[in-house]
Image (tube, rainbow, N blue to C red):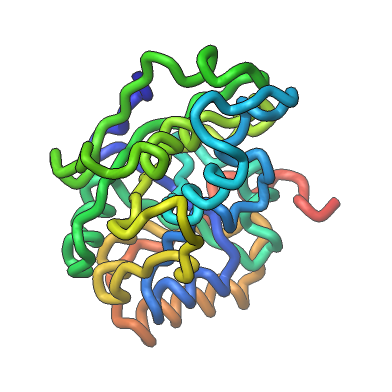
Amino acid sequence: MIEPIEHYAVLTRYMPFIKLVSMLEEGFFIPKANLFSDKWEGGLHLFNGKEDPFLTKEELKTAKDWIYVSCWYANEPETHAMWNSYGNSDNAVAIQTTQYDFKAAYHGSKIDPMCSYVGKVKYHMPASAPELYDNQSIRPWLGNNNNDSKDPKTTYPRFYLFHKHHAFSFEKEARFLLIDNDATVAKSNDKLGIHLSAKHSREMIKKIILHPNCSDWFENTIRKLVKDTYKLDIPIYKSSLVGHKSLSN
């Protein structure tokens, strides 16, 4: 079984400043899986040249086009590796929420219910599909409304997307998956992803952490943006890693 996430466990997302602004202004964005930079996303079983026993490569690619994935760091202590990989510069922040608050933001955004799955990513060396995915189960996070009547070719890749190469194990990742109600392997998805409402996206942020190397100017900018521009009562903290060697060195 894919390890579940506790409802009130802290989930962290590292992001550059521009993504925080976008989230506050336009709402939290949940992209489709095909937009991820890792070309083996959902395809670890194909890494060694093995065939997928259930889907052609084109069907898998199209199926992932209809699956929206939100990725979070599921380990509370900060890490330089995550700042380096996802902060992009010293002008970055980490936001924190919980599964409970993320779910509340989704429901508050009035998005149609979809098949949903949540859990912690497993990290492996490449292997065949049966070795990686057999006897797996994944919990829903929007109630027990998952529709087993959907084309299995559009839902089966959910198993693939909870398994990544061991090289990414530092991410300690938890994922929320959604499968579009119009999912099909007959055509691609025109949408890039879905947005939670700006109002509920703001409400789900329980804490903001500043990059360990951020300037005083950046700290003041974040505080003014959150407190003055958006009138939000979100606690803002300096990084617990302040004092470490500069990340740019």
The extreme left residue here reads: 144
Identify the residue at horizontal 62%, vertical 29% (top origin): 44
Q: Quadrant of residue 237?
A: bottom left
Is residue 211 toward the left or the right of residue 68 in the image?
A: right
Identify the residue at horizontal 19%, vertical 46% (top origin): 142
Identify the residue at horizontal 50%, vertical 61% (top origin): 188
Q: Quadrant of residue 159?
A: top left
Is 87 located above or below residue 224 in the figure? Answer: above
Q: Nearer the viewer, residue 217 or 130?
A: 130
Count of numbered circles on the image: 0
Identify the residue at horizontal 34%, vertical 82% (top origin): 230
Q: Nearer the viewer, residue 177 or 51?
A: 51
The extreme front residue here reads: 186
Query: x, y (%) of residue 175?
Result: 41, 41
Query: x, y (%) of residue 13?
Result: 48, 52
Tell me the quarter of the image containing the N terminus. Answer: top left
Is 42 located above or below residue 193 in the figure? Answer: above
Q: Quadrant of residue 92?
A: bottom right
Is residue 139 toward the left or the right of residue 2 in the image?
A: left
Can residue 237 be seen here?
no
Can residue 188 be seen here?
yes
Query: x, y (%) of residue 221?
Result: 53, 79
The extreme bottom residue here reads: 229
Query: x, y (%) of residue 129?
Result: 55, 21
Is residue 246 toward the left or the right of residue 92 in the image?
A: right
Q: Nearer the viewer, residue 89 or 31?
A: 31
Is 79 located above or below residue 213 in the figure? Answer: above
